[in-house]
Image (cartoon, grey):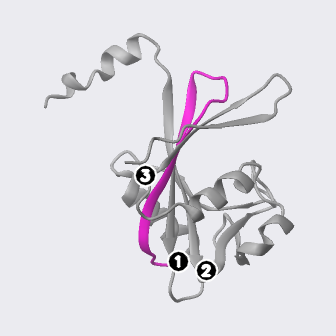
Amino acid sequence: MPKSDQGIDVSLKRQRYVVIPRTLVFITRGADVLLLRGAPTKRIWANKYNGIGGHIERDEDVHTAARREVREETGLEVDDLRLVGLINIDGDQPTGIMLFVFTAQSRSGDPIPSEEGTLAWIARDQLTQIDLVEDLSVILPRALELPLTAPPFFAHYHYDEQEHLVIRFNQPPLS
């Protein structure tokens, strides 16, 4: 298929909504989840716990990007990397974020911290006791508890007039 058949030129001329693709990976080992506590110098999410992830490079598919981000931020190789959710994040700008949410398992090895922050294995029953990035208290349990046979979840984020995050899920029907 020629590049012109993708409709990219037409979409950009019409000022269509554009998204930046990103990955977010929740790595488990037994009953623990590996989370990254953002470095105090980070512009966003400083000192807050988040999953592992980042931008998708131009020459990558989302799965490859998720694996690369895990290696870069933790030094770990993971098994069972599975897409569990897609989130369209609308910040009321012409460009939003499309977040591809994955789960994975790490069976061995110690994570190696990076400039992104420090890494910690957190017991699932302790997740409510730490300072998570705002949406994690909602999407982390959903991602970890998604049955293997279930399709990924779909969500849309936007901010109301008071700048509060509003999360809307759209569950596809199960076959």
Q: Residue tagged by mark 2?
A: 112
The image position of residue 142, as x and y in percent, is 61, 56
Q: Residue at x 72, y 49 (%)?
A: 135
Tell me which label, 2 or 1, sits earlier in the chain.
1
Residue 95, percent from left and from top: 56, 27
Residue located farthest toward the top when viewing the structure as drawn: 14
Magenta residue span? 75-98
Assign a secondary structure to mark 1. loop
Judged by its main secondary structure, the magenta piece is strand
Q: Earlier in the sequence, mark 1 or mark 3?
A: 1
x, y (%) of residue 157? 65, 35
Residue type of the residue flagged with mark 3: Pro
Q: Is residue 15 above or below residue 108?
A: above
- Percent position of residue 64, x then y: 37, 60
- How many angstroms separate mark 2 from mark 1 (CA)? 5 Å
Q: Is residue 158 left or right of residue 87?
A: right
Instruction: Point out the frontmost of discs 3 and 2.
Output: 3
Q: Is residue 128 left or right of residue 61?
A: right
**Residue beneath disc 1:** 75
Q: Quadrant of residue 158?
A: top right
Magenta residue check for 113: no
Crowd tier of the residue under label 2, counting other residues whose Cα lies within 10 Å: few below 14, some 14–19, many 20 or above: few
